[in-house]
Amino acid sequence: MKPLALRTRLTVFYTAVFGLLLTALALVSYRVLAQQLDSDATSSLTELTNGLHGYLRIENGTPAFAFDPNDPDESAFVRRATRYFQIYDGATGALLAQSDAMEPLGLTFTPVEVTSFRDQPRLHDIQTDYGRIRLTNSVIGAGGRTYLLQVGASLAGMDTALNTFLQLLLWGVPAGLLAAFIAGGWMVRVALAPLTHLAHAARAHDPADLAQRLPIRGADDELDEMAAAFNGALARVEDAVGEMRQFSTAIAHELRTPIAALRGEIELAAMRPGLGEEQRAAAASQLEELDKLKRLIDQLLTLARAESGQIPLSLTRVELAPLAASIVEQLEPVAHAAGLTLTTELLAQPAVNADEGWIERLLLNLLDNAFKFTDRGGGVIVRVSEADGWARIEVEDTGVGMAPDVLPHVFERFYRAEASRAGPGTGLGLAVVKHIVEAHGGRVAADSRPGTGTTVRLTLPRVTAERLPATA
């Protein structure tokens, strides 16, 4: 299973944390609101009960409320306190008085229940058809008798408020999570944008140009620290590669003189009179190996100079079809001597902005490689065409071909398949070709199957008459 991207993981993590906090906040808010409303309802009901005691008069078992009807405050308080009330005889449990609003609720208690309320006065919440109601139970003594006063208050308003708040939470929490997910994705994208730009810059880094560095934004943050560390690694790699290129160039120069001297000595030794055929064959084999070593050194030196920029490109307009035809004409005798058929297919007349000498070297390397791995009786075709603004050169042979696991490595320097290690190649020809093509802004690829041959395909940016090439 493919792991989630960092952006997705951060967004999900942020949303999950925000969701937990939002849910916890919703639960705590609901709990606090419920407790506060309940406490306010209890306090208000207790005040009503205590205040009503001062206005209640019971004479001969008949309760009445004594207050000044001309006092608006007293009148309002008594009307509010007596909206839900009832009075029982504490001894018999008989109902003595009941408010009009209390009667339809059906809250008439038995003598046993009245005795229980009298002995243990406390609050009671009772569910009715009209909603919850809370009752206080208080004992009043008058005329040597005890009475149970019950004062009530409706909790319907509180319950409605809590239900409304709960509905808001049930809708608000998912909406908040959705908003958190969208906002989290945006925040993560903004936060990771510098890292994304840094990754793009790293991917765009040209391995052939080790002097390139990643941009530093100047924010002096962790990303700048990472870019600086990466640039430091690039600088160390550049130094190491530079030393390797200098070493390759120096080795190539130093080996040329002793190889030339050794070749001269072998040739002189082979020319001595009286030398046997076996000794002459051994000398010829040694000369062949020396030639192979010389070609390797020349190619290594050329590649090292090109990669270090010591051989600049001289760009001019180059017509590929005439150039390919000219090279094929020059190499026809070589192909004929090797028993091969060398032909051209000029399907178009594209022009490129290139160094003609390098393009010629490129074609020579490809043809030399094709000749080496094509048996007598085979053929090599140089095909020139164009498509979608690109000029194309293909060198196709009917040689031994390559296995699929070899193709990804054929343009690596010194890479040679096991089947070709005994051949005359050096492992640098196609590496030189790749460098030349990429230096001209092109691409190179190879198609091959064992026993059927190989096709090397080059694509270079095509120029027209209106686009005159620049010179360098």
Image (spheres, grey):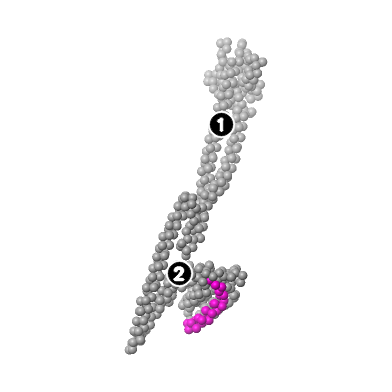
- Give the answer, above or below, for where 239 lies relative to 159: below
Picture disc at residue 310? 2
Foreground of the two, 269 or 310: 310
Mark 2: few/some/many CA within 10 Å (<14, 14-19, 20+): few
Secondary structure beneath disc 2?
loop
| Residue 350 visible from this viewpoint | yes
- Location of residue 461 in the rendering, given as x and y in whole percent from the top left corner: 56, 69
Q: Residue at x 52, y 45 (%)?
A: 14
Please, what is the dominant secondary structure of the magenta stretch?
A: helix
Dot 2 amino acid type: Gln
* Residue 323 included in the magenta stretch of the image: yes
Q: Nearer the viewer, mark 1 or mark 2?
A: 2
Q: Is residue 123 above or below residue 323?
A: above
21 or 213: nearer the viewer = 213
> What's the amino acid at mark 1?
Ala
The answer to which image quadrant residue 470 occupies is bottom right
- Dot 1 alpha-carbon crowd within 10 angstroms: few under 14, some 14 to 19, many 20 or more: some
Element on which disc 1 rests: helix
Task: Choose between 116 and 362: the one closer to the eye.
Answer: 362
Residue sticking out furthest to the bottom = 274
How many labels sit on residues?
2
The residue carrying mark 1 is 34
Residue 337, given in percent of the width and then of the height, sits at 48, 84
Residue at the image position 58 percent from the left and 16 percent from the top: 53
Task: Give me the residue at 48% from left, 77% from top.
Answer: 368
Give me the residue at 65% from left, 16% from top.
71
Percent coordinates x, y for residue 129 in the rendering = 63, 28
In this rendering, is residue 65 above or below 184?
above
Give the magenta range.
Answer: 315-340
Q: Position of residue 115 (x, y in %)?
A: 55, 19
